[in-house]
Image (tube, helix red, strand yellow):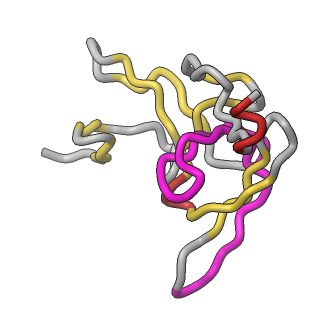
Amino acid sequence: SSGINAEYGGRTIRYPDPLSKVHDTIKLDIESGKIVDHIKFEHGNLAYITGGQNCGRIGIITHKEKHPGSFDIVHVKDSVGHSFATRLSNVFPIGRGKQAWISLPRGKGVRLTIAEERD
Protein backbone atom coordinates (compact mmCIF):
# COMPACT_ATOMS: atom_id res chain seq x y z
CA SER A 1 0.00 0.00 0.00
CA SER A 2 1.29 3.42 -0.88
CA GLY A 3 1.08 6.55 1.24
CA ILE A 4 2.82 8.19 4.13
CA ASN A 5 2.65 6.48 7.51
CA ALA A 6 3.53 7.81 10.95
CA GLU A 7 3.62 6.09 14.33
CA TYR A 8 1.91 7.77 17.29
CA GLY A 9 1.70 5.86 20.55
CA GLY A 10 1.58 2.46 18.86
CA ARG A 11 -0.98 3.52 16.25
CA THR A 12 -0.13 3.86 12.58
CA ILE A 13 -1.74 6.95 11.06
CA ARG A 14 -1.86 7.08 7.28
CA TYR A 15 -1.33 10.50 5.72
CA PRO A 16 -0.43 12.47 8.86
CA ASP A 17 -0.65 16.26 8.78
CA PRO A 18 2.43 17.52 6.91
CA LEU A 19 2.70 20.44 9.36
CA SER A 20 3.30 18.15 12.37
CA LYS A 21 6.93 17.27 12.97
CA VAL A 22 8.91 15.15 15.44
CA HIS A 23 8.12 16.04 19.11
CA ASP A 24 4.82 17.76 18.21
CA THR A 25 1.61 16.64 19.92
CA ILE A 26 -1.51 15.67 17.95
CA LYS A 27 -5.18 15.49 18.91
CA LEU A 28 -6.64 12.35 17.34
CA ASP A 29 -10.30 11.51 16.75
CA ILE A 30 -10.26 7.84 17.75
CA GLU A 31 -13.49 6.92 15.91
CA SER A 32 -12.37 8.22 12.51
CA GLY A 33 -8.60 7.92 13.06
CA LYS A 34 -8.12 11.45 11.73
CA ILE A 35 -5.87 14.14 13.19
CA VAL A 36 -8.09 16.93 14.54
CA ASP A 37 -5.40 19.39 15.69
CA HIS A 38 -1.74 19.56 16.68
CA ILE A 39 0.59 21.54 18.97
CA LYS A 40 4.03 22.44 17.70
CA PHE A 41 7.08 21.91 19.92
CA GLU A 42 8.13 25.55 20.10
CA HIS A 43 8.90 28.41 22.47
CA GLY A 44 5.92 29.77 24.40
CA ASN A 45 3.90 26.53 24.47
CA LEU A 46 2.85 24.73 27.65
CA ALA A 47 4.67 21.45 28.30
CA TYR A 48 4.51 18.54 30.75
CA ILE A 49 7.76 16.93 31.92
CA THR A 50 7.48 13.13 31.66
CA GLY A 51 10.81 12.00 33.09
CA GLY A 52 13.97 12.86 34.94
CA GLN A 53 14.40 14.87 38.14
CA ASN A 54 11.63 17.32 37.12
CA CYS A 55 9.03 14.63 36.30
CA GLY A 56 5.46 15.90 36.77
CA ARG A 57 6.28 19.58 36.46
CA ILE A 58 4.42 21.81 34.00
CA GLY A 59 5.66 25.04 32.42
CA ILE A 60 6.25 27.15 29.35
CA ILE A 61 9.03 26.17 26.92
CA THR A 62 11.50 29.08 26.93
CA HIS A 63 14.61 27.83 25.14
CA LYS A 64 16.01 24.77 23.34
CA GLU A 65 19.75 24.02 23.19
CA LYS A 66 21.15 21.71 20.53
CA HIS A 67 24.11 19.57 21.60
CA PRO A 68 25.39 17.49 18.65
CA GLY A 69 26.45 14.04 19.80
CA SER A 70 24.70 14.44 23.15
CA PHE A 71 21.22 15.15 24.55
CA ASP A 72 19.40 18.31 23.47
CA ILE A 73 18.34 20.40 26.48
CA VAL A 74 15.04 22.27 26.86
CA HIS A 75 14.59 25.13 29.35
CA VAL A 76 11.13 25.46 30.92
CA LYS A 77 9.65 28.11 33.25
CA ASP A 78 6.74 27.20 35.55
CA SER A 79 3.81 29.43 36.55
CA VAL A 80 5.59 30.61 39.74
CA GLY A 81 8.62 31.78 37.75
CA HIS A 82 11.06 28.96 38.57
CA SER A 83 13.19 27.93 35.57
CA PHE A 84 14.57 24.43 35.08
CA ALA A 85 16.17 22.39 32.30
CA THR A 86 15.63 18.81 31.14
CA ARG A 87 16.34 16.55 28.18
CA LEU A 88 14.29 17.04 25.03
CA SER A 89 12.92 13.49 25.27
CA ASN A 90 11.31 14.33 28.65
CA VAL A 91 9.24 17.27 27.33
CA PHE A 92 5.67 16.72 26.08
CA PRO A 93 3.73 19.75 24.73
CA ILE A 94 0.20 19.90 26.22
CA GLY A 95 -1.10 23.29 25.10
CA ARG A 96 -0.69 26.40 22.99
CA GLY A 97 0.50 29.39 24.97
CA LYS A 98 -0.76 29.03 28.55
CA GLN A 99 -3.98 27.19 27.55
CA ALA A 100 -3.74 23.45 28.31
CA TRP A 101 -5.54 20.80 26.25
CA ILE A 102 -5.77 18.52 29.29
CA SER A 103 -6.99 19.02 32.85
CA LEU A 104 -4.03 19.87 35.08
CA PRO A 105 -3.34 18.17 38.42
CA ARG A 106 -3.78 19.87 41.79
CA GLY A 107 -0.96 22.39 42.16
CA LYS A 108 -0.77 22.92 38.38
CA GLY A 109 2.53 21.02 38.11
CA VAL A 110 4.49 23.41 40.34
CA ARG A 111 7.17 21.81 42.55
CA LEU A 112 7.05 23.09 46.13
CA THR A 113 9.99 23.21 48.51
CA ILE A 114 9.81 21.09 51.68
CA ALA A 115 8.92 24.19 53.73
CA GLU A 116 6.13 25.14 51.30
CA GLU A 117 4.69 21.59 51.35
CA ARG A 118 4.60 21.63 55.16
CA ASP A 119 2.51 24.85 55.26
Image position of 14 with respect to 22: above or below = above
Which residue is at the far right?
A: 81
Q: Nearer the viewer, residue 70 or 116?
A: 116
Which residue is at the far top?
A: 31
Q: Nearer the viewer, residue 33 or 92?
A: 92
Give the image location of residue 32, x and y in percent. 28, 15
Identify the magenta region.
43-69
**Quadrant in which the C terminus is drawn:** top right
Residue at (67%, 26%) from the top-left corner? 108
Is 72 included in the stretch rendered in magenta? Answer: no
Residue at (58%, 85%) from the top-left corner? 68
Is 52 included in the stretch rendered in magenta? Answer: yes
Which residue is at the far bottom?
A: 69
Give the image location of residue 23, x and y in percent. 51, 51
Which residue is at the far left?
A: 1
Horizontal relation, residue 114 to residue 6: left or right: right
Residue at (53%, 25%) from the top-left corner? 37
Residue at (51%, 58%) from the top-left corner? 52
Count the labels in the image: 0
Give the image location of residue 60, x and y in percent. 75, 42
Give the image quarter of residue 10: top left
**Quadrant in which the N terminus is drawn:** top left
Image position of 67 with respect to 45: above or below = below
Horizontal relation, residue 58 to residue 15: left or right: right
